[in-house]
Image (cartoon, rainbow, N blue to C red):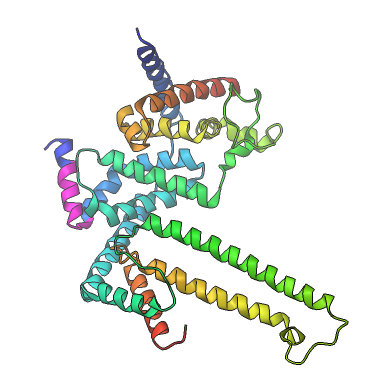
Amino acid sequence: MTAIDELADVLARAHRGEPEAFEWLVDAYSARLYGFLYRLTGHRDDAEELVQEVFVRVVRHIEGYDHDGRFEAWIFRIATNLVRDRIRRVGRRPEIGQLADVGEEGADGVANDRRTSAGSPSPEAGLELADDVERMQWALDQLPAAEREVIMLRHYSQLSFADIAQSMETPLGTALARAHRGLAKLRRIMDGAS
Amino acid sequence: MTDRDQQLREIQRNERWLHDRLNGASGDLAAPDAEAIKGRVRLALQERWLADELSDDVPQDLAKRLKATTVAALGGRSQLHPTAGMRQGERGRRRIMAGWGLAAAACLMVYMGVRQVNQHDRGGSVAAAPGDPFSDYQEDDLLVSLTQLSDDFDDLDYSLSDQVGFDTSDFMLDDLLFQMDGVLGDGDGSS
């Protein structure tokens, strides 16, 4: 049985409400979803909670999902929408964003909507910046939300740009431009901060 | 090479860089607690099962009958004519419009109340004629009017909500109880 067939079989069993099928999906997708959600929210606790919520939504709506080979696009779209809802509702900013301002200003038009007026990084901040994971999170946080979403969808879901464009309801050219701009900015920010 | 090709090449190059960064020597994020997620999934499955079971208990035509009863009960007070096909978005939009309507009406009421009080104050030196409604004016009068207006708005809001009909969501039972409460409230005149 190929991976594609296996997923189709699992989804058919999930349709019937078999717990083992959902556990299979958790094993297959939770790590990537968690990474994706953490990169978008900047909070580990939020990411954990949202991963659970994603699977709750899957349980509730799997009957309405008609498998067409795009399950990943579907589940990551749920995750993306949950993040958007969370940010809109709570307005929470990634804590790591507090550390913004380690040199250049604006990074060639990088949106600063999440930057704070914080000055030089504190000693604690410096320690955190030493952590590659946190440093990447900090850099991602400097990007506009739409660019960050495209880049993270691409990395964690491994969707094609066509699927991402469809998922985000934007033209393909827009998705490509966001990825192109976002990645270039990300490199500049990371290079400037290192 | 077209601009698009050039763009794609740069994206691919930068994606390789990102991949190395995210999955490099330091590794990316630790895995989430899969068991906790599975536990939540099991709970969600039980909730789904329960919702299915409970929905089986509801007679299929109950929603239709409740709607008809509710519309009949509200018919005398509302000029709205519900349509069964109203969608969620329409409900939201109508609620916003109704909210604005309430706000405008409340402002008008306050304005009229203040105007009346001012008129009364300007004529304060003149002895009030017997039976002059302003001579018995109380601030509570305005409050009572606004409260009544708010009640009317609640009725309107309720009738708008009712037009959406039943969802197949988890809130179905809540909706049902809410609607029954509304019908009973109207029926016994307590609303």
Up the image or down, A148 lies above or below B173; here it is above
Where is the N terminus of chain A found, in terms of image quarters? top left
* Magenta stretch holds residue A14: yes
> Which residue corresponds to the image point at 20% horizontal and 46% vertical from the top-left?
A66
Q: Is residue A22 left or right of residue A80?
A: left
In the figure, is residue A1 to the left or right of B153? left
Residue A39, how many percent across, how many down? Answer: 46, 38
Locate residue A157: give its quadrant: top left
How far across and down, in percent of the image, does residue A170 sit?
Answer: 38, 33
Q: Is the residue B111 above or below the residue B139 in the image?
A: above
Q: Is residue A106 magenta?
A: no
Q: Residue furthest right?
A: B125
Towards the viewer: B81 or A163: B81
Position of the C terminus of chain A, as image quadrant, is: top right
Q: Is residue B144 visible?
A: yes
Above/below status of A137 relative to B174: above
Q: Residue at x 83, y 78 (%)?
A: B123
Farthest residue, direction top:
B1
Look at 30% across and 52% down and name the residue there: A58
Question: Nearest the camera: A17 or B136?
Answer: B136
**Residue B189's spot in the image, x, y percent?**
44, 87
| A39 over B82 or under it: above or below | above
Chain part drawn in magenta = A7-19
**Magenta stretch mostly in which secondary structure?**
helix
Q: How many marks?
A: 0
Q: Residue furthest bottom?
A: B130
Report whether A108 appears left or right of B55. Answer: right
